[in-house]
């Protein structure tokens, strides 16, 4: 079996080094031989690869079709190297659980990720593999990676699969009982918990508990509600730190999203969500 080596050409790209490996393939840092443009090349090859060539092609097609272009990486190229298929995409930096994120940066990133996941849902799809390794940034902007597990919502409801990464997988998905958009909400909540600074866990606990409820009927139902609850809990962080995090975030969200923010204005300041979050933080009520 041939393995890409540093300095070796693959099509019009030159391999620099390996940067990751998963069940769908191995990812290499590459640059375009003539222009020097840096990118990520994913090839259906690796010791831990379980994806079939058809599954790899489906992932490639999801990336090339730009299902949610604002929230995913650009697609550059594809081809065959020896007998293995590959595709080339924009280079992104995945989040690391060891990253030292401030509360402000955590909110900024997860706000962006929530819109990206919501865009998949609006497009009739479920991502099915939300986790920190698939939440990334390009020039500071949130991007969602690894589209190999994406499923059509209408098909997923009829034929639930055990799909995704076990640690972040909703209980009903593990048991093959149900697969709908709430599975992404669960994975989103687990990812938020993993990246949340310990000093803020108590304040953000109500959101995490609600988003990761084992019972999907009691879980946070949509990404829009998740955003509302996150912003409500920012008020609690403000009160403990004497900052203006929630107010500043609300202004940023409105400025950056324009019409989208005004159309969903109630989402960012729902009194019932804020009051419920405050009560939950004091232990007087458990999020539904």
Image (spheres, rainbow, N blue to C red):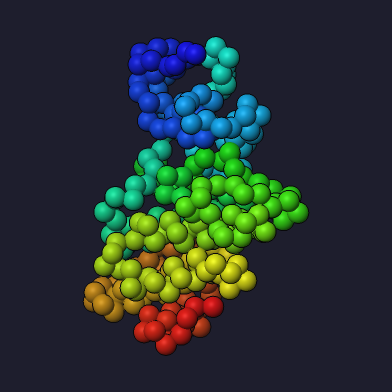
Left or right: where 238 falls relative to 222: left
Relative to 121, residue 137 above or below: above
Q: Residue at x 44, y 68 (%)?
A: 208
Relative to 237, residue 89 above or below: above
Residue nearest the observer in this picture, 20 or 276: 20
Residue nearest the observer in this picture, 263 or 34: 34
In the displayed image of the protein, which residue is found farthest to the left?
242
Residue 93 horizontal/vertical position (percent) = 37, 40
Q: Quadrant of residue 240?
A: bottom left
Residue nearest the observer in this picture, 145 or 70: 145
Q: Quadrant of residue 50?
A: top right
Residue nearest the observer in this picture, 23 or 149: 23
Q: Residue at x 46, y 85 (%)?
A: 285
Q: Residue at x 65, y 54 (%)?
A: 176
Residue 235 horizontal/vertical position (percent) = 36, 76
Left or right: where 37 falls relative to 257: left
Left or right: where 176 falls relative to 44: right
Q: Residue at x 33, y 73 (%)?
A: 202
**In the rendered view of the protein, which quadrant contains the C terminus?**
bottom right
Residue 62 horizontal/vertical position (percent) = 61, 37
Residue 66 visible in image: no
Q: Quadrant of residue 259?
A: bottom right
């Amino acid at each position: 079996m041939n393995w890409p080596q540093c300095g070796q050409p693959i099509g019009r790209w030159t391999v620099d080094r390996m940067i990751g490996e998963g069940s769908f393939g191995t990812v290499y840092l590459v640059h375009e031989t003539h222009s020097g443009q840096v990118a990520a090349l994913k090839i259906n090859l690796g010791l831990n690869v379980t994806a079939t060539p058809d599954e790899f092609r489906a992932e490639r097609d999801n990336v090339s079709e730009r299902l949610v272009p604002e929230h995913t990486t650009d697609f550059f190229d594809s081809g065959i190297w020896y007998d293995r298929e590959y595709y080339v995409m924009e280079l992104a930096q995945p989040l690391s659980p060891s990253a030292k994120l401030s509360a402000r940066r955590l909110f900024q990133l997860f706000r962006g990720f929530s819109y990206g996941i919501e865009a998949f849902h609006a497009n009739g799809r479920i991502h099915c593999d939300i986790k920190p390794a698939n939440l990334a940034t390009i020039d500071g902007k949130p991007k969602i990676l690894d589209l190999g597990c994406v499923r059509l919502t209408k098909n997923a409801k009829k034929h639930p699969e055990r799909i995704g990464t076990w640690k972040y997988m909703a209980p009903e998905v593990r048991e093959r009982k149900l697969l709908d958009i709430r599975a992404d909400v669960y994975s989103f909540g687990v990812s938020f918990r993993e990246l949340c600074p310990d000093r803020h866990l108590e304040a953000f606990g109500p959101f995490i508990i609600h988003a990761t409820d084992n019972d999907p009927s009691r879980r946070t139902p949509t990404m829009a509600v998740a955003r509302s609850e996150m912003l409500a809990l920012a008020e609690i962080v403000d009160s403990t730190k004497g900052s203006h995090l929630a107010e500043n975030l609300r202004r940023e969200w409105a400025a950056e999203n324009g019409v989208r923010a005004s159309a969903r204005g109630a989402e960012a300041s729902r009194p019932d969500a804020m009051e419920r979050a405050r009560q939950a933080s004091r232990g007087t009520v458990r999020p539904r």
